[in-house]
């Protein structure tokens, strides 16, 4: 589609009849990944046949493509009785899936470092009540080096990297808000 909304192109039809969500561009702009029927799919940015990368993953949520194009990170909601949400990465070349961490609680978004070696995510602390607060964490792809970057009483979510510093959105109150203030992390 052109910037003015003209020349629209149908990229794909629902492959399974279900709805699409969490669309994300590949770093080179050639592909779009999305969720449909609890699976990760990709389609050419020019349209064409969609390719299913995963089998059904119940409760899957959120997709984030790594800047180097090698990985798609995702997490899924816990089943009743569990309070952790595992974060996984999917190798876009081999379709191999790898667990990064299962220690995340009540995730509120995730993002990649510019060098594709770390993921930042917003999550609650296991020793705090649900929705008491969310902090921003970073973790290496092999699951090591989990660091709480904020340790704040505020509820933070939707972290993203800006240059080489992660940022997060934090509402002024401990309830959902569509806009908040930006807080720079690191030096």
Image (cartoon, rainbow, N blue to C red):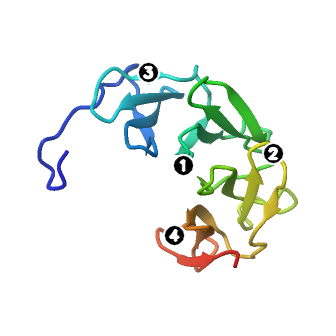
- Give the CA separation, mark 1 to mark 4: 28 Å
- Give the CA separation, mark 4 to mark 3: 36 Å
Q: Which mark is residue 51?
A: 3
Q: Which mark is residue 143?
A: 2
- Give the CA separation, mark 4 to mark 2: 31 Å
Label 3: few (<14), some or many (≥20) within 10 Å? few
Q: Specify the quadrant that holds the N terminus.
A: top left
Residue for point 57% across, 23% down: 54
- For mark 2, give the secondary structure: loop
Residue 109 in the image: state x and y as whole percent.
60, 54
Q: Which mark is residue 100?
A: none
Residue 170 in the image: state x and y as whole percent.
60, 73
- For mark 3, give the secondary structure: strand
Residue for point 61% across, 41% down: 74
Residue matched to label 1: 67
Q: Residue 50, relative to residue 150: is it above or below?
A: above
Q: Circles 1 and 3: CB distance less than 8 Å?
A: no
């Amino acid at each position: 589609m052109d910037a003015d909304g003209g020349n629209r192109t149908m990229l794909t039809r629902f492959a399974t009849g279900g709805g699409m969500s969490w669309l994300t561009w590949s770093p080179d702009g050639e592909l779009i990944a999305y969720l449909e029927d609890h699976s990760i799919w990709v389609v050419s940015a020019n349209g064409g046949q969609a390719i299913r990368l995963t089998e059904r993953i119940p409760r899957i949520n959120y997709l984030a493509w790594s800047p180097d194009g090698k990985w798609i990170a995702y997490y899924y909601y816990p089943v009743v009785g569990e309070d952790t949400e595992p974060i996984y990465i999917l190798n876009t070349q081999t379709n191999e899936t790898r667990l990064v961490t299962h220690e995340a609680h009540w995730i509120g978004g995730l993002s990649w470092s510019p060098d594709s070696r770390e993921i930042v995510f917003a999550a609650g602390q296991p020793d705090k009540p649900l929705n008491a607060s969310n902090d921003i964490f970073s973790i290496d792809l092999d699951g090591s080096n989990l660091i709480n970057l904020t340790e704040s009483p505020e509820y933070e979510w939707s972290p993203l990297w800006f240059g080489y510093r992660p940022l997060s959105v934090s509402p002024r109150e401990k309830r959902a808000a569509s806009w908040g203030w930006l807080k720079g992390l690191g030096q």
